[in-house]
Structures are given as C-alpha cells and as structure tokens.
Amino acid sequence: MLKFAANLSFLFAEHPFLDRFARAAAAGFRGVEYMFPYAHAKEEIAERLRAHGLEQVLFNLPAGDWEAGERGLGCLPGREAEFRQGVELALEYALTLGCRRLNCLAGLAPAGAVEAAEVEAAEVEAELRATFIANLRWAHAKLAPHGIELLAEPINSRVDMPGFWLDRPAKGLEVLAEAGVGRLQYDLYHAQIMEGDLTRFLERHLAAIGHLQIADNPGRHEPGSGEIHYPYLFRRLAELGYDGWIGCEYKPAASTEAGLGWLAAARDI
Ligand SMILES: O=C(O)C(=O)[C@@H](O)CO
Ligand SMILES: [Mg+2]
C-alpha cells in the first residue's frame, strides 16, 4: 500500500496551522509534512502529532528570509554560518517531533549569476555548486548520527521559483552523487515542468529518491486535474516496491476535503 502524507502548508490551509493536524487525521492521513515548523513551539506540534496519531514525515531546513523572497540558503556563498545554525535548529525540532527526513532548499542563484558573461557565469555556477555540496556534507554529518536523512529537492524555475538554483532532477542527481550524501526529494509536479519522463526517472533512480511529492500540472491542483496520469504512476510505484512517503503538496481547487476523491482509489493500490 502506498503511504500518503498531508502537506499542511498546502492542505487544510483554510484552518489555523495547529488545527490542520486534526483535519488531516480525520481525513485518514497517518503522516504529515509542511514547509517550516519554526513559528511554533516544537512541544506544541509534538502534542498535536501525539493526540492525532500522526507521523511527522518531513520539513525543510530554515530557508533564509522567506518573506523577503529567499528560498533556501544551501547554495549561497557567505551564508554558511546561518545555514549551520539552521541545521542545528532543524535537528532540535526533528528530534522532538520524531522526524526522520529534512529537506535542504538550495535557494535562488544570486542576482546577476544568470545574466553574467559565459566564463564568469561558469565560475559562479561552480562556486554555488561547491557551496551547496559543502553545506550538504556538513548537514549530513550532523543529522546522520541521529538517523535523520538529508534530502534535496529540485524545484521548477519556469513557473514557481524563477532563479531557483537546483531546478532539474538530473542536476539534483548529479550534485548529490558528487556530494556523496543525501537523496532526492522528487516532486513530480516540478519534475514534469522541467524534464517530464516521470516513469522512466522513477524506474531508473528510485534508490536515489528518499521522498516523493505530488500535484498535477498545470495549476498545481489535485492529482487528476491535469496532464499527469497519476493512477498509472501510483501502480508503477507499487510494482517497483516504493515504500517511502508521498507528500500531497497541491493547492486544493476548492476545499481540501472536497478534493480528496482521488485518494481513496490511490490508497488501495
Ligand atoms: O515547493 C515545494 O515543492 C516544496 O516542497 C517546498 O517545501 C519548498 O518550498
Ligand atoms: Mg515540493
């Protein structure tokens, strides 16, 4: 049976954050994920998990000043000290919440990096890559002794996060292989936009994938609302023996509950 986690940054967002745990459990979810827990006391979140019998599946390392437009610190030269503080904080939360996976957001390439002349652009790219790899190795060394897996997620730079440095799954695989640590958080929505060929990617690289997330394209709504044939992908994942979590990270087209029709069939696969 496939395991689906409710992403509480996207689902049940019509309710206050701490109330979303009860809603997710009532809808039949056994696991939850979200972007960031840091605005809430970790003990308070742990209590919600316990009260509703939920597993904390995943959240992100601190990602800089989100309100100001930052989208991660992983590849940013000069921000290493802040990155490390973020890892320490995330570790405290993960230990209290019993969370076994943390996602490291690479961040946006610094302004000018994309427009720079070819030689200069190649140098900047090499520096961002080296920074990301060094940060991944540092975070892995902190987290692995606690049984916490480090993940890195390619996010599409065409629609949702223009300028996001780690924007293609192929690049994600390459960078992680060079780092020698961490696995991929493969978000099928972002992957469809940047590279497609989802089934073949899953078949070839499942061992390098530590977590999946789903939404349909275009619109980032419920599975079944767009071009991705999720029933086929779910069957294929079950055949391949995928036993990790699948995070439901989509924007409900109406209310969350009204849009959960797809899940009943998917859970039986
Ligand atoms: O946007 C996504 O996709 C995510 O998984 C977020 O957690 C990162 O912003
Ligand atoms: Mg995602």
Image: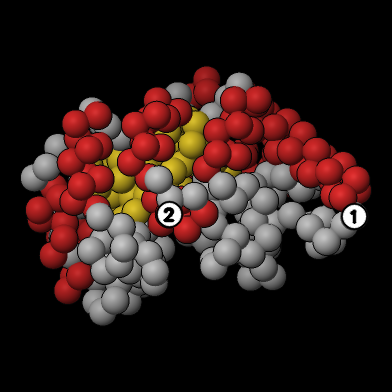
**Whole-percent x and y of residue 134?**
73, 31
Q: Is residue 108 left or right of residue 185?
A: right
Q: Residue at x 24, y 53 (%)?
A: 230
Within 8 Å of ligand 1, the CB of disc 1?
no
63 versus 56 height, above or below: below
Residue beneath disc 1? 117
The Cα–Cα distance between marks 2 and 1, rounded to whole angstroms, is: 30 Å
| Amino acid type at image mark 1 | Ala
Q: Residue at x 45, y 24 (%)?
A: 147
Marks 2 and 1 in Cβ contact (< 8 Å): no
| Amino acid type at image mark 2 | Gln
Residue 195 appears in the rendering: yes
Residue beneath disc 2? 192
Q: Is residue 258 left or right of residue 31?
A: left
Q: Residue at x 84, y 43 (%)?
A: 122
Secondary structure state at the residue bearing disc 2: helix
Q: Is the image coloured rainbow, by chain, by secondary structure, or in one colour?
A: secondary structure
Q: Earlier in the sequence, mark 2 or mark 1?
A: 1
